[in-house]
Amino acid sequence: MSRITKLLLFSCALPLILFVVYRWGSYSYKDQVAVLAYHHLSDKDKSNVTITPELFRNQLALLKSKGYHFMTLDEFRSFMDGGPAPKRSVLVTFDDGYESFYTYGYPILKELRIPAVNFVVTKDLANPKAPKLAALSKDEIREMSTQTDTIEFQCHSHELHTKVDGIPALTSFMQVNGEMETDEAYRSRVVKDTQMCINSLTGLRQKAVDMYAYPFGDYSKEATELLRQAGIRYAFTVVNRTLSRSDDPMHIPRVNAGNPSITPEALDRMIMRRAVTQNLPFLRKKDTPGG
């Protein structure tokens, strides 16, 4: 039987397989982690990466009721280093370091006893009210870090969360005094920016700062290597699938959970669908930067 024939037969059978999985909840993935990606929580603001606090709480409450295991970063590091992962493992992540995480997300996470990590643009710490959406302050990060050891803060760059002619600054060359920067200047800029982000967060908390979410989900081979040189061990993309043990720790995929159209039930189904197809490589699309 040819590979194409097998694929066609499986494609026909997949809806039935997924129906059984969803209807009876009989599938519990293992050796995988669904890394959930969120950004902003608000009852008023509207965007494709903004959800209400109520929806956020309902999503997490449903997953918890269905037996999902919410990982701490220590558990996640252990898994990436070859350790075990409980069935239905999930890691909650936030990008951008918005103040809405402190106002809405943190109380919900505390109430449900769910760990999470927020990837912070550390430049905003100097003037957290300056951005269009208010950012976390140093005092807010200190408070959350002091009250619990399961809410953590990692890097989303210091000041590279911007674009140059439509291309993310992390992966593009910039003009300095009217001249394009050299290869050496580019490499130095990325390493120094990453080290500045690490140092800014290290001064606010005690745990290791060794994780990075690529701005806009964009990365390159060189940028990844520069982050590694700066001290980053794990880097997160926006490639929309679950994480398996064999994945590159510098190219960690995530499941987009922070779209307002994703109901709690839809998120559960989406995670299970991603977990099923993760075990079937011929159904997976090739990962690309930016998702």
Image: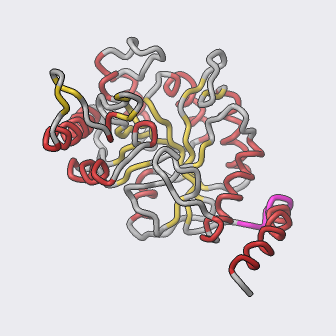
Query: Between 264 and 113, which is closer to the camera in this rendering?
Result: 264
43, above or below 88, in the image: above
Q: Where residue 148 appears, x then y in whole percent?
A: 44, 38
Q: Is residue 202 visible?
A: no
* Magenta-colored span: 21-27
Q: Where residue 17 appears, x then y in whole percent?
A: 81, 68
138, above or below 227, in the image: above
Q: Quadrant of residue 86?
A: bottom right
Outermost residue, front direction? 179
On-image quarter of the N terminus = bottom right
Q: At 51% from the left edge and 56% from the top edge, which residue is drawn?
A: 287
Q: Is residue 116 visible?
A: yes
Q: How many labels were placed on the picture?
A: 0
Query: Between 228 and 153, which is closer to the camera in this rendering?
Result: 228
User: Is residue 85 magenta-colored?
Assistant: no
**Model colouring:** secondary structure
User: Is residue 26 magenta-colored?
Assistant: yes
Outermost residue, top direction? 130
Q: Quadrant of residue 117?
A: top left
Q: Is residue 171 left or right of residue 19?
A: left
Q: At 19% from the left edge and 36% from the top edge, which residue is drawn?
A: 189
Q: Where residue 152 appears, x then y in whole percent?
A: 41, 40
Q: Is residue 84 left or right of residue 284?
A: left
